[in-house]
Amino acid sequence: MRRNTPIVLLSVGHACVDIYQGSVAALVPFFIAERSYSLAVASGIVLAASLLSSVAQPLFGVLTDRWAMPWLLPVSTLLGGLGIALSGLSGSYPLTLVFVALSGIGVAAYHPESARVARIAGRGSHRAMGWFSTGGTVGFALAPLMVAAVMSVGGLRWTPLLVLPALVGAALCLPVVRVLQQRQAAGPRATRPPAGSDDIASFVRLSLAVVFRSIAFIGLSTFISLYVRERLGGGIAVGTAALFVLYLGSTVGAVLGGFLAARWERVAVARWSYLVTAGAVAGVVWVPGPAVFLFLALTSAGLYVPFSLQVTLGQDYLPSRVGTASGITLGLTVSIGGLASPAVGALADATSLRTALAPLVAMPLLSWLLFRTLPEPRVPGAESPGAVAAARSGSGAAKPG
């Protein structure tokens, strides 16, 4: 297998898994339309996907720090797809919650081990981790389009078709699993991450920053479809377009984050990104007319510029517990955002969607404040982005040919 092939396969597999994280929010309008759920009740579905995932991800992270479990990648991918596929088959609200929670467990099991494997496959490269994270954002972006296409065929009873990406993702994981098994057979050093000292205080502050980011993103992704339809007076197509823009902007942001981190320190890039994002969220909430789509794109890009950077920062703050760090920064803190969705929904039922979304403006500001307290971790043997950029500039390597 070529050098970059494992990270490419992992990135596409990550997209297949994160389709199911995006599918939960994309299914909410259809649950409301077909089952007459209130906003608070419908957001409970998002809560179900997030709750078990939030509890399970650190546990899977601890397990992957103790034992290598690459077989979890295909198994968890299938579990994530199966839960969403079954979610529309029963009119029972408790059963719907169970199936969506099952999908959440699959997603929870996938992320810690996949991030550990991606770190090994990318040989510790921040850029490789950026591409791996970008795969997840692509899955998010595709989710509303895929769900809308399937729902247009026959409504919720056609959700079994949504298992197809899981089958593809599981198949793509298998070659990577075989390569890792061969490396393990060659010797433990082939799959051992670099050692270092843990900075727990910085990791805790980083995790809190990711939590606030997650509340903003999941709050918007859960209700933005309904909000834009309400503001612009459009139908389901307008709401789906808004969700697609939100998710597509995240893909652009993830790629941009890797590019910026090659020139500047990750903490600085994330700090400025969150500050700009606060203004963009305010535009989504209060600027009238079709301009909401522009501010949505800016918001999602701004929230995702720091995404892969936060994963590698977490791993560098806890180099002796890469699985745990990955499970928290890539999974737990992201899932926790879903815990706030019922509160947003209840406030929207009592007041209006605009009023309920207004507090989300403060979330990136809180992340910005926390990032102001974070140091850039110094990884042994690694050069800082500034030093690399200066060296390239001095040698002329950065000039176009």
Image: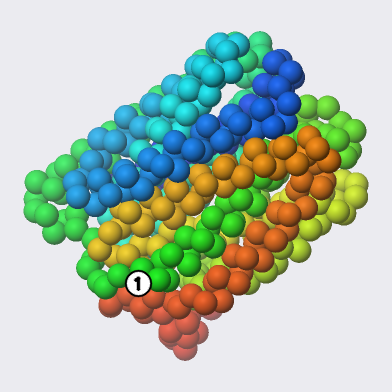
- Residue 143 visible to an observer of this rendering: no
Q: Position of residue 377 (x, y in %)?
A: 39, 75
Residue 331 visible: yes
Residue 84 on image: x %, y %: 51, 24
According to the picture, the residue beneath numbered tag 1 turns out to be: 199
**Vertically, is 390 above or below 64?**
below
Q: Quadrant of residue 242?
A: top right
Q: Is residue 333 left or right of residue 347?
A: left
- Residue drawn at x 35%, y 62% is 315
| Residue at x-position 59% and y-position 56% | 213
Query: Is 222 on the left-hand or right-hand side of 23?
Result: right
| Residue 226 image point, x, y percent | 77, 34
- In the picture, residue 69 is in which quadrant? top left
Amino acid of disc 1:
Asp
Percent coordinates x, y for residue 332 in the rendering = 45, 48
Q: Which residue of the protein is positioned furthest toward the front in this rendering?
A: 350
Furthest residue toward bottom: 394
Vertical relation: 200 (above or below) 338: below
> Relative to 102, does residue 60 appear above or below in the rendering?
below
Vertical arrangement, residue 204 with respect to residue 105, above or below: below
- Would residue 300 appear left or right of 49 to someone viewing this image? right
In the rendered view of the protein, which quadrant contains the N terminus?
Answer: top left
Q: Could you say which is closer to the camera, residue 28 or residue 118?
A: 28
| Mark 1, secondary structure of its residue | loop
- The residue nearer to you, when weighing 190 against 204, is 204
Q: On the picture, is 241 further left or further right than 15? A: right
| Residue at image location 62% in from the left, 15% down from the top | 156
Query: For this rendering, which residue is in front, 12 or 284?
Result: 284
